[in-house]
Amino acid sequence: MSDQEQAKKPKKPSRSQMRSASRSFALQALYQWQMNQSSVNEIEAQFAVDHEMSTCDKTYFRELVYGVSSKAKALDELFEPFLDRSLSELDAIELATLRIGTYELSERLDVPYRVAINEGVELAKSFGASESHKYVNGILDKLAQRVRFEEIAARRNANK
């Protein structure tokens, strides 16, 4: 293959890019689940048909959608103490974003806490209201202090 042909060939997305795309699709699927109370199986099937998902990690998308939907109440209880309003007053995008971030912070210890927070902020910037990313950042940061304190302490000690 010539250099010119190689330059035209689309690059395969990195693992982190594929995970970001998975989170984006999961946010949309969870928003739909929250709003319509559709079954997660139906939503997953619809996404497979309606969206070009070749650039996402489909396994991670599936884990997020099924994990968040099945543990929504427990996830809500983890971040609810840090809210300045009731859970019912949260915007649906903020709620879905906080649930994904909380799921990653509490269930996916392989995802660094800073990545989980940053990805939540990026989702809020892309899909949420104009300042919701700041709110999401504050909530996830406080939650991380509670559920990832050892990781945060180790990072602080390493930087000294």
Image (cartoon, grey):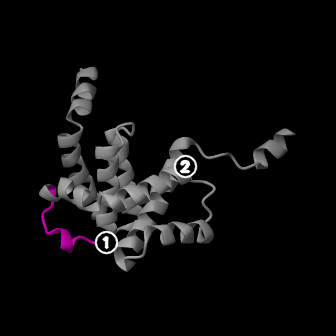
What's the residue at 83%, 44% (across, down)?
4
Residue 95 vertical position relative to residue 21 in the rendered view, above or below: below
Q: Circle 2 — which element?
A: helix
Q: Nearer the viewer, residue 159 or 147?
A: 147
What's the residue at 23%, 22% (across, down)?
157
Quadrant the C terminus occupies: top left
What's the residue at 35%, 67% (across, down)?
128
Q: Which mark is residue 44?
A: none
Name the kind of residue labelled 2 in the image: Met
Local packing at callout 1 (Cα closer than 10 Å; few below 14, some 14-19, many 20+) is some
Left or right of 69? Residue 28 is right
Residues in magenta, as a range: 82-91
Q: Circle 1 — which element?
A: helix
Q: Quadrant of residue 96?
A: bottom left
Quadrant the N terminus occupies: top right
What's the residue at 53%, 51% (across, down)?
59
Instruction: Give the spatial CA distance, label 2 vs label 1.
Output: 24 Å
Q: Quadrant of residue 14?
A: top right
The image position of residue 88, as x and y in percent, is 19, 73
Q: Are the residues flagged by discs 2 and 1 in contact, CB closer than 8 Å?
A: no
Q: Nearer the viewer, residue 60 or 101?
A: 60
Residue tagged 1:
92
Residue 99 vertical position relative to residue 153 in the rendered view, above or below: below
Name the kind of residue labelled 1 in the image: Ala
Left or right of 40? Residue 150 is left
Q: Which mark is residue 18?
A: 2
Q: Is residue 25 magenta?
A: no
